[in-house]
């Protein structure tokens, strides 16, 4: 089948799980004989190396001109799209997948913008529109501009089905469907409720709700996410399918003889240091563990708005010698961090899926995961905790560190289980969903 | 006679390099040699060398009537040996004139008194030996890091045999009293206490180039008039400041060197005034009163207390952590390890972790190689974690 996919990020230029998931998924889909055209807001030079998909840069694609000027066309499109949905430019850093650098940049940019207008959305007069593909205060205007040319792409790129990822590209999907009349699949990796708790951004929620109601099928990354889509967005249950995320088939590096530097056991938290990832529960559990066993080192890798608070808390607990902060880690550093670790903890308050425990397991690192995570639905060889129960979390950390047979069992069974959590299986399921609606 | 008593602090910390978690257990060298060299060379060019040349000229010109004193931290002397021998030689030249007193402090410019009296004593003795060895002089005056002082510091310093100690003449210490007399610490019978006249000291050190200040521009004549106005109501006017005031904090184009060059001439125009070193002032005056200082004072920030180094959890945790290692370090009897541990005690490391951003925050930022106190804390703890691993081997 020919799939026209709209996404926001793609390796190697990614800032979070969405890009990783899109890459694994498209690779498996293409091995199932699907042809994928993947539309991105902006192609980075390195993106060109992906061979299994045709990558399309919105900025290099001529807008549909008919008898209108490009600018008029874009304005007209935005007016039309905006009719369905109330959209305002948002002057807060939208944080779904922000990297450290982007976060810092955004804060600076916001500080500069503070009282002035958000730059207007229609700055170009040429035949192309330019998008940055970044996250930030202009994100909403980028989302709308991206959608405004989606239809023109849908007209020129042959396809049988439209597949979009998360709210950033939902308007584009709806617009593409309007032009080509092909069925629309929305893939929900994370919802506004996951990112913002109950203090949701109304415009983002509205886009999600609008998109879900226009879609022919919705793919949720977990049952948890599916339930939220049904209950909080009023979507009919038969339209919402669960396809869990996975890992690549050939990717099992293990420790590969790696010599770690620390002679203490290392317990890792890796992720954005934000409310929904539960970093504070990790810190409190670490204090409880260190009170009983000082031969452990804790590492918090990542960045986020809660980092200063976490650092201050560690200092207050007088644990700075045993609890380390690495800041945001990139590519090879992430790999090294997993290899340095003896246990991975994901105490998320809200995690639609949570692919990082699977990543950790690829390096023979046993994992403790929050019960409120999508990955908990597919993983048996993991210890599961209520994120708020730091006594229980501390107990389980100590248990894994103290009992080698338990650790061994989690690693061995985990590696067996990983073999079943493959993108290939996910791709097969998605293929069936395509078939049913095409 | 009224004395004008100059003491200059000369110090440069050993700044740490960027040290990531992944270096722990693998990289046992912590100092940023490149940055330390660059800063030493820069400060030598802008401050130490030109100011020392000027001081030497003034000493020669006034044939014994112009006198000054220095405290040079041990870490700073080590850096001069490593990066700017010329600077060290020029200080030696000054010391050889007989018009310069050298003052003792803790070798590592540390907060050791607050954590370990034993370690404090060892660092004071180490500094004393270093000054004898490099300059052939035996200090009898002591100043603690950043003028941190209370009754207990005085008692410990008296027991070490010093005759004079310097402290901040903070308002909450002096109350109605004047800093311009010689005092005796409440806990002591021999040691004499000289207090900084912070108003006149800060006129030079902080306000000199401030164009918004009502007394700008400050000339040697104007300053000498202020000093002379004290005639009859004081015995000594103690001007204590960082030596980097000359050429580094106050740039050359502010006229600071010109001010300094002409100051002795204007001061000495009044025959009731003379220059003297702390030891001379102390030897020639009996204390007017005992001074009770139970709480710590320092010369830092507007609070004049310990909050620049012990004001938040980051600082408390890092300080606790480094001093908790004392017994394990000393037991190794390994000189390299002891030296490294001491270099991690330099007060600047903790100053960088300060989160007081208002008023004094600007000063903190200016002297801070890190972009945030959090970065300073994380980096320091990574280094300390590695240092701890070296103790186990």
Image (tube, coloured by chain):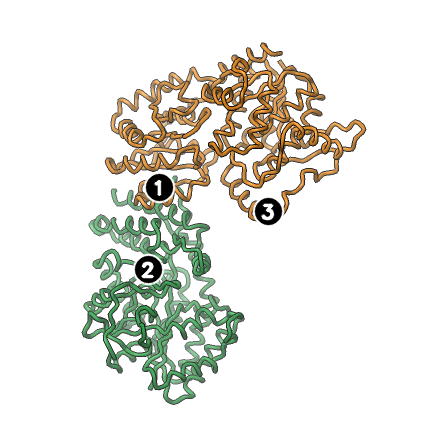
Image spot of residue B62 (x, y percent): 40, 84
What's the chain of the residue with tag 1? B
Mark 2 secondary-structure assignment:
loop
Are both tags, 1 and 3, on one chain? no
Discs 1, 2: same chain: yes
SS class of the residue under badge 3? helix
- Figure check: B263 above or below A164: below
Which residue carries the number 2 mark?
B306
- The lab-note entry on whether marks 2 and 3 share a chain reads no
| Image mark for residue B303 | none
Q: Which residue is mark 1?
A: B24
In the depicted view, which residue is nearer to us: A28 or B355?
B355
- Estimate how packed mark 2 is, as few (under 14), some (14 to 19) or many (20 or more) residues with alpha carbons within 10 Å: some
Residue matched to label 3? A113
Which chain identifier belongs to the green chain?
Answer: B
Foreground of the two, A139 or A193: A193
Report the residue at 30% width, 43% height from top. A317
**As displayed, is residue A215 above or below residue A146?**
above
Within 10 Å of the Cα at label 3, are there few (<14), some (14-19), or many (20+) other Cα atoms?
some
Q: Residue at coordinates 18% horizontally, 74% vertically from top-left?
A: B189
Question: Relative to A26, is B11 on the left or the right?
Answer: left
Callout in the foreground (2, 3):
3
Q: Is residue A175 left or right of residue A222?
A: right
Q: CA distance from mark 1 to mark 2?
A: 31 Å
Determine whether, in the image, residue B99 is placed left or right of residue A115.
left
Q: Position of residue B202 (x, y in %)?
A: 42, 71
Task: Write the residue at 43% across / 68% down.
Answer: B48
| Residue A435 against residue A201 in the figure, above or below | above
């Amino acid at each position: 089948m020919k799939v026209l996919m709209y996404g926001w990020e793609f390796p190697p230029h990614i800032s979070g799980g969405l890009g990783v998931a899109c890459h694994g998924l498209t690779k498996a889909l293409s091995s199932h004989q699907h042809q994928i055209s993947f539309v991105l807001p902006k192609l980075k030079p390195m993106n060109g190396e992906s061979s299994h998909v045709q990558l399309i840069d919105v900025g290099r694609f001529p807008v549909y001109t008919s008898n209108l000027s490009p600018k008029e066309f874009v304005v007209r499109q935005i007016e039309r799209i905006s009719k369905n949905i109330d959209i305002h430019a948002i002057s807060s850093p939208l944080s779904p997948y922000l990297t450290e650098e982007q976060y810092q940049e955004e804060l600076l940019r916001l500080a500069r913008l503070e009282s002035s207008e958000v730059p207007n959305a229609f700055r170009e007069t040429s035949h192309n529109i330019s998008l940055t593909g970044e996250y930030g205060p202009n994100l909403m205007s980028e989302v709308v501009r991206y959608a405004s040319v989606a239809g023109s792409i849908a007209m020129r790129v042959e396809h049988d089905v439209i597949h979009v990822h998360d709210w950033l590209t939902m308007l584009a999907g709806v617009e593409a469907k309007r032009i080509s009349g092909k069925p629309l699949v929305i893939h929900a990796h994370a919802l506004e409720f996951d990112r913002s708790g109950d203090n949701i951004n109304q415009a983002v929620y509205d886009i999600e709700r609008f998109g879900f109601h226009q879609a022919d099928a919705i793919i949720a990354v977990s049952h948890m996410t599916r339930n939220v889509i049904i209950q909080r967005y009023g979507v009919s249950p038969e339209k919402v399918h669960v396809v869990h995320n996975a890992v690549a088939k050939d990717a099992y590096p293990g420790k590969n003889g790696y010599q770690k530097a620390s002679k203490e056991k290392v317990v890792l938290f890796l992720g954005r240091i934000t409310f929904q990832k539960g970093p504070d529960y990790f810190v409190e559990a670490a204090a409880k563990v260190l009170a009983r066993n000082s031969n452990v080192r804790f590492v918090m890798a990542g960045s986020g708005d809660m980092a200063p608070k976490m650092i201050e808390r560690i200092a207050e607990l007088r644990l700075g010698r045993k609890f380390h902060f690495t800041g945001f880690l990139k590519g090879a550093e992430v790999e090294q961090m997993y290899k340095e670790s003896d246990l991975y903890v994901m105490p998320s308050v809200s995690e639609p899926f949570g692919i990082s425990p699977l990543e950790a397991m690829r390096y023979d690192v046993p994992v403790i995961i929050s019960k409120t995570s999508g990955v908990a639905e597919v993983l048996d060889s993991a210890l599961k905790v209520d994120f708020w129960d730091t006594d229980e979390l501390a107990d389980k950390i100590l248990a894994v560190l103290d009992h080698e047979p338990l650790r061994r069992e989690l690693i061995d069974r985990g590696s067996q289980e990983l073999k079943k959590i493959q993108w290939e299986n996910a791709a097969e399921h998605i293929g069936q969903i395509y078939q049913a609606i095409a | 006679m009224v004395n004008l008593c100059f003491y200059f602090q000369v110090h440069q910390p050993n700044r740490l390099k960027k040290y990531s978690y992944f270096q722990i257990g693998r990289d046992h060298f912590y100092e940023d040699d490149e940055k330390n060299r660059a800063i030493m060379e820069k400060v030598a060019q802008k401050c130490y060398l030109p100011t020392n040349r000027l001081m030497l000229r003034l000493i020669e010109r006034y044939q014994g009537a112009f006198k000054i004193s220095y405290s040079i931290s041990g870490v700073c002397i080590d850096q001069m040996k490593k990066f700017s021998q010329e600077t060290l030689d020029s200080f030696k030249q000054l010391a050889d004139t007989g018009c310069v007193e050298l003052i003792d402090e803790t070798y590592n410019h540390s907060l050791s008194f607050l954590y370990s009296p034993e370690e404090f004593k060892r660092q004071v003795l180490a500094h004393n030996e270093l000054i004898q060895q490099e300059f052939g002089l035996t200090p009898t005056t002591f100043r603690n890091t950043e003028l941190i002082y209370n009754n207990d510091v005085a008692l410990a310093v008296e027991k070490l045999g010093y005759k004079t100690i310097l402290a901040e003449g903070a308002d909450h210490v002096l109350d109605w009293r004047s800093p311009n007399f010689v005092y005796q610490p409440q806990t002591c019978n021999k040691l004499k206490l000289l207090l900084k006249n912070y108003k006149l000291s800060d006129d030079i050190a902080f306000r000199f180039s401030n164009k918004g200040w009502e007394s700008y521009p400050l000339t040697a004549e104007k300053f000498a008039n202020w000093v002379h106005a004290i005639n009859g109501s004081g015995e000594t006017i103690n001007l204590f400041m960082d030596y980097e005031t000359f050429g580094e904090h106050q740039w050359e184009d502010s006229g600071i060197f010109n001010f300094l060059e002409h100051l002795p001439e204007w001061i000495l125009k009044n025959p009731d005034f003379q220059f003297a070193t702390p030891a001379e002032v102390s030897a020639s005056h009996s204390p007017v009163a005992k001074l009770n200082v139970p709480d710590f004072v320092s010369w830092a920030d507007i609070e004049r207390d310990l909050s620049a180094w012990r004001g938040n959890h980051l600082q408390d945790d890092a300080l606790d952590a480094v001093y908790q290692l004392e017994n394990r370090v000393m037991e190794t009897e390994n000189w390299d390890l002891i030296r490294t541990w001491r270099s991690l005690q330099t007060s600047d490391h903790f100053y960088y972790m300060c989160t007081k951003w208002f008023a004094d925050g600007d000063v903190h930022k200016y002297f801070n190689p890190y972009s945030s106190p959090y970065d300073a804390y994380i980096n320091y703890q990574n280094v300390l974690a590695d240092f701890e691993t070296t103790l186990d081997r």
